[in-house]
Amino acid sequence: MYGNPNRVRFTDPNFEETVQRWFEECDEEFSDPDADPESNITSENTITSDHETGSELSYSASDDDGQDVTESGEDSETSEPVKKYFYGKNRYKWASTEPTRNVRTPAHNILKLPGNKNALPNIEPVNAWRKIFSEDILDIVVHYTNLKIQEFRSKPGNENRAEYREANSVEINGFLGLLLLTAAFKSNNETIESIFATDGTGREIFRLVMSAKRFSVLLA
C-alpha cells in the first residue's frame, strides 16, 4: 500500500485486495468482545481517486440513520448486522452490498417520464395546440403582455398610438401563429421589415394578420 495505510487509489494494483482486507478487518473489529464499541463506530477508512472529477469515497461501518454496527459484550443479548456504505464526494450514499430483491422499490427510486399516459385520439392540429396552450395559459400570456404594453404607453407621445392598444386572446393566438410561420418559412434570421415587406419579397399572410409595428410591440 502507498503512503497512508488507510488510503488507496483506484489505479493502485492492490486496490481490490486492500478494500477486501478492510471489510475483513472491520468484521473482526466488531466481533472482538474486548474492543471498544465507540472506537468501532467512529473508525473510517478512505478511498481517494486522483481523477479530475475528484470523486472521493469514504468507507464507513455505520450509516446516518442510526442503524449502526454489531455490539458485542456480556450485557448484549441481541445484535444487529453490520451495514457498510461508501460515501461520494457530494455525500451520496452507496451500499457496498446488493439490496434485497424481495422488497418493494422505494418511491424515490421510481422514475416517471413526463407526457401523456394514454395515446391521444386523432385530433385536428388546432386542438392539439390547445392541449399545450390552454385557455388558462393563454390568459396569463395576455395579462403580462398588457402589463408590458402599459409600460410602453406610459411614455410621452405613446398614449394614443394604435400599436400600443391592449391585446386580447384572439390577437395573441394570431401572433403565436405568425411565430410558427416564421419557423415554417425558415425566417428566424430575417428582420421584421423583411418579413412584412410590400415589394413582393415579404410574406403577405403576416400583413393580413397585423402590422409590422404591432408585431414588434407584441414581440418586445
Image: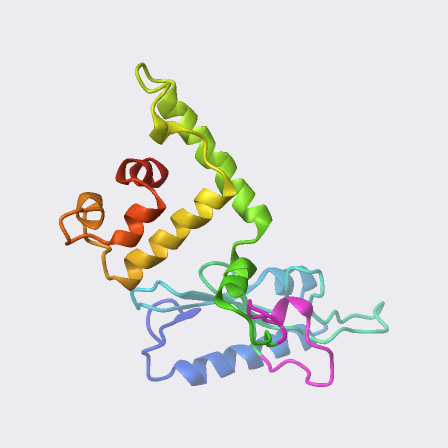
Q: Taking 13 as reference, is 132 left or right?
A: right
Image coordinates of residue 141 in percent, x first then y, are 49, 42
Location of residue 217 with respect to 74 vertically, above or below: above
Q: Which residue is painted at 39% across and 65% down in the image? A: 55
Q: Is residue 101 magenta?
A: yes
Q: Taking 69 as reference, is 95 left or right?
A: left
Image coordinates of residue 110 in percent, x first then y, are 62, 72
Q: Taking 179 as reference, is 186 left or right?
A: left
Q: Which residue is painted at 31% across and 67% down in the image? A: 50
For residue 49, which quarter of the picture?
A: bottom left
Image coordinates of residue 115 in percent, x first then y, are 56, 68
In the displayed image of the protein, which residue is found farthest to the top? 156
Instruction: Report the predominant secondary structure element of the magenta stretch.
Output: loop
Q: Which residue is painted at 60% across and 60% down in the image? A: 42
Q: Quadrant of the N terminus?
A: bottom left
Location of residue 31 with respect to 164 vertically, above or below: below
Q: Is residue 134 magenta?
A: no
For residue 182, which quarter of the picture?
A: bottom left
Location of residue 217 with respect to 137 vertically, above or below: above
Q: Quadrant of the C terminus?
A: top left
Q: Nearer the viewer, residue 9 or 104?
A: 104
Q: Taking 156 as reference, is 112 left or right?
A: right
- The boundaries of the magenta stretch are 97-118
Q: Nearer the viewer, residue 78 or 106?
A: 106
Location of residue 96 with respect to 141 vertically, above or below: below
Task: Name the image colouring.
Answer: rainbow
Q: Which residue is painted at 52% across and 65% down in the image? A: 128
Image coordinates of residue 52 in percent, x first then y, are 29, 64
